[in-house]
Amino acid sequence: MSAPVNPTDSENLETAFDIALVPEPLHTEDPLDQGDAYLAALAGVHESRDEALRAFRNASRSDIDLGDLERIFKAGNKTVAMGMLQSRRRITYGPDHALDADHRTMYWDTSKTYLDMLVCVGGDVGLAPLIPSLDSHHNFSFAVDLSDSRRVFTAKKIKLGFDRTGCMMWIGRTGPKEDSWLAFVPREYVEAVAEGATGEMDEQPPNPNPSKVSSSLTQVQQRQVRMFLAHCFEHFHHRGITVTDPYPDVTNDMEYRSATNILYVHHRTGYMLPP
């Protein structure tokens, strides 16, 4: 190959170069993935990805407080900062670096995010976690959809803090098309949340085969939930939904269907409810 070098008024000088002298990483037009670069820096370029991950996980880990990192940054101590990259660290933080979710300076906006998935688990019993405050989202809307109550929560690598088996029910989506689920969790989880002691529960690994375990409620339990929602809608005067018997025998099809008109009202408005 040849390329012009320092052209003059009289002639274009050309010089040849050997492409073999170009370093191998520069042969590709695509940039190197940052994850691969990080793993290469940790374990060496000749080790495989699995070996690099194994080396990282087997490395000894030490804790460092976020306040210490703040002081190092403000002091501009690059030597200490670079030295810390040679070992595995876990960042801890105290109350000075944490704010409550309902703090007045917090503004939650999930319309734009670079996360692959964001899962929010309510910290109390009830439907309130689905409803944001007026100041943060005054145009909030929620589309109740009971047509797919048998949907299974199959998100992998998600730690809910409780066993999802047979305790969840999909009930619709919020305005930004975010899936919403009702979860009937064990009493121990509720008590742990109230005491602020969910750390150990969150460390429990998720089910290794979530697709093989059904998270949906039984048919009887789903009918009980629909009766509860029908009672709420009647109280709100929502779309003319009525309830004649708040506690019907949900194992009896005729008694269950005659206890509320929620099945037929949603049928007319585009919602198809399962029996």
Image (cartoon, rainbow, N blue to C red):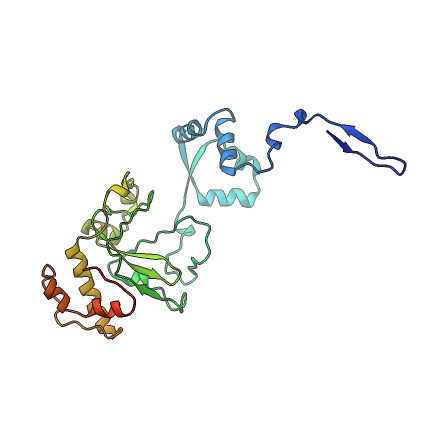
Residue name at image x 31 percent, y 53 percent: 121
Give the vertical position of 18 relative to 37 (above or below). Answer: above
Describe residue 16's horizontal placement relative to residue 145 as left or right: right
Against 242, is 166 above or below?
above
Percent x, y of residue 10 = 90, 36
Q: Is residue 11 left or right of residue 49?
A: right
Q: Is 49 on the left or on the right of 183, as rendered?
A: right
Task: Name which residue lies at 73% across and 27% down.
Answer: 17
Position of 167 relative to 6 (above/below): below
Q: Quadrant of residue 109?
A: bottom left
Residue situated furthest right in the rendering: 10
Asked whether 163 or 135 is in front, the reply is: 163
Residue nearest the viewer, comparing 245 with 272: 272
- Decide which of 130, 214 is in the foreground and name it: 214
Residue 12: x, y in percent? 84, 35
- From the viewer's side, name the closer residue of 20 and 168: 20
The C terminus, quarter of image: bottom left
Q: Position of residue 259 (x, y in %)?
A: 13, 69
Q: Quadrant of residue 264?
A: bottom left
- Whether 7 is drawn above or below 190: the answer is above
Residue at position x 35%, y 51% from top? 119
Question: Whole-percent x and y of residue 40?
Answer: 51, 30
In which quadrant of the rendered view does residue 257 lie? bottom left
